[in-house]
Structure formats: C-alpha cells, structure tokens
Image (tube, helix red, strand yellow):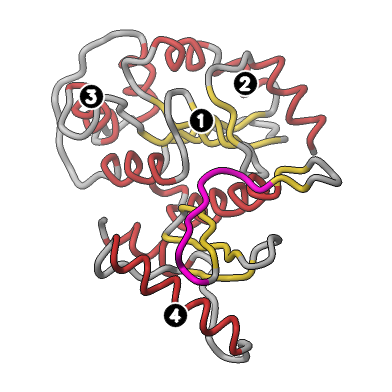
Amino acid sequence: MNKRLSGICLLLLGVSMVGLSAAETNAKEDITKSLNKIFPGVTPDSIAPSPMDGVSEVLIGPRLMYISNDGKYLLQGSLIDMDTRVDVSEARRNEIRLDALNDLGEENMIIFPAKDEKHTITVFTDIDCGYCRKLHAEMDKYNEAGITVRYLMFPRAGVDSPSYEKAVSVWCNKDQQDAMTRSKQGETLPKASCDNPVKEEYELGQLIGVRGTPAIVTEDGSMLPGYVPAARLAKALQAGS
C-alpha cells in the first residue's frame, strides 16, 4: 500500500484507547491479536462497539468488517436493523468512502465542472469501458443539469495493462479534459508517463468496493454501479438533497 493510502488508513476514524472500559480494551486486544495471526503486521485503524452486542466494528483502511469481541468470529456483509429495516453498515460505508475521497483530494482528479453547480459526483472510470464512454458522451448534459463530474481512474484489467497505460497517458497530458474526451472516443493518444495517481486510485477503488465501471459516488457517499443517464441522475440527486 502506498504512502497516501497509508495516510488514509491512519486518518480514518482512529479511536483512542483513553477512557475505554476494561471490556472495550480487552476486545481491542483480542481482536488485534486475532487479526495479526491472519494479517501479520496489520494494525486496525479503528475498533469500536457496533450496534450488535458482543461484536465490534473494525476498520482496516476504508474496509469495514465486524468481529466478535473475543476475536473468534468475523462477520462479512451488512448489519440490518430489523425494526427499521435500515442497512446500518451502508451508512458507515458511505461515510468511509467520503473520508477516503476527501483525503485523496481534487488535485488528483480530472474534473468537468458545471457552470451552475448543484451537485458533485465522483466517477471511477475505465478508458476502454463501453458504458464509461456512454457516460462521458453525455458530459454536456450532466454539466447542464448542474452536475460536476470528478473522474478517478479504475483500469479494470489492472496495473500495467493497456487500459492502465491509456489512463496514465490521459493523466500526463497537458490538457487532461481534452485527452480524456479523445481517448473515450477511441483515439489512441501518444504514450506518456509522469508522476500520476492512477495506481493509487485503482487501489482505492478496490478498497471502497468498486467492482465495475463506471462506479458513481454521490455527495453522501452512496455508490451507484453502472451508467445512469444525466436526466435520471439529476432527479435522483435532487430527491436525495
């Protein structure tokens, strides 16, 4: 994991040992010991009581999991409040996504701003993804609807793949917006290299749950998988604001 992602891990919801009850302190110790058996040298960034008795919420970077306080059992998936039918875990994941994106910073994004900005979305994109290209072809419509689009690179084929190299070439272009548009239209750009955040963005996407592209993260941290037409997205964002 690179230095910036390590920084994200350290900044995300760290919990102090000061003022904890003996039970909470013991839970932290037992959980940390159990995790170290599976992931040697990895220290959780946060261990805190979860809504479920006897189970703690554990963060390793932006990854959320639940572990029994004795460190014996790990629960994967979401906690659902049976009374309200609310997915408690998804609300936490939303917060974690926003923290991670804010720490990455807009200086590491390629941004297509709306003149009359009403909403901002962050899109994990792949140059060669058909639906990513369809989304980009509607950029004027998103912007006209008051939606600013912030791009992060997520070459699905992985690091050092042709898609990865295309993403780097876009990032290293003097006019990133123009390079993004031309590349999304199928033009092969001259290969370029420079200091770039493409690998970091790909790794971050994996950590926060991106499984395909485009993946849209809204202002509240919700993730919408796949292409959403501009008009429908504008209505959804307005309804949620």
Q: What is the magenta range?
A: 70-79
Tell me: residue 37, above or below residue 167. below
Nearer to us of marks 4 and 2 is: 4
Residue located beneath label 2 in the image:
142
Q: Give the SS element for disc 1.
A: strand
**CB within 8 Å, label 4 to label 2:** no
* Residue type highlighted by circle 4: Glu
Mark 1 vs 2: CB contact within 8 A: yes
Q: Locate residue 135 relative to residue 34 in the image: left or right.
A: right
Q: Can you identify the residue that label 1 sits on?
A: 112
- Examine the structure image and report whether residue 102 is included in the region drawn in magenta: no
In front of the other: 8 or 72: 72
Q: How busy is the neighbourhood of tag 3: few (under 14 within 10 Å), some, or many (20 plus)?
A: many
Q: CA distance from mark 1 to mark 4?
A: 46 Å
Q: Which residue is mark 3?
A: 166
Choose mark 2 or mark 3, whichever is in front.
Answer: 3
Q: Is residue 113 shown left or right of residue 3?
A: right
Q: Which quadrant does the C terminus fall into?
A: top right
Q: For mark 4, does the 10 Å Cα neighbourhood hold few (<14), some (14 to 19), or many (20 or more) residues?
A: some
Residue 76's spot in the image, x, y percent?
A: 51, 46
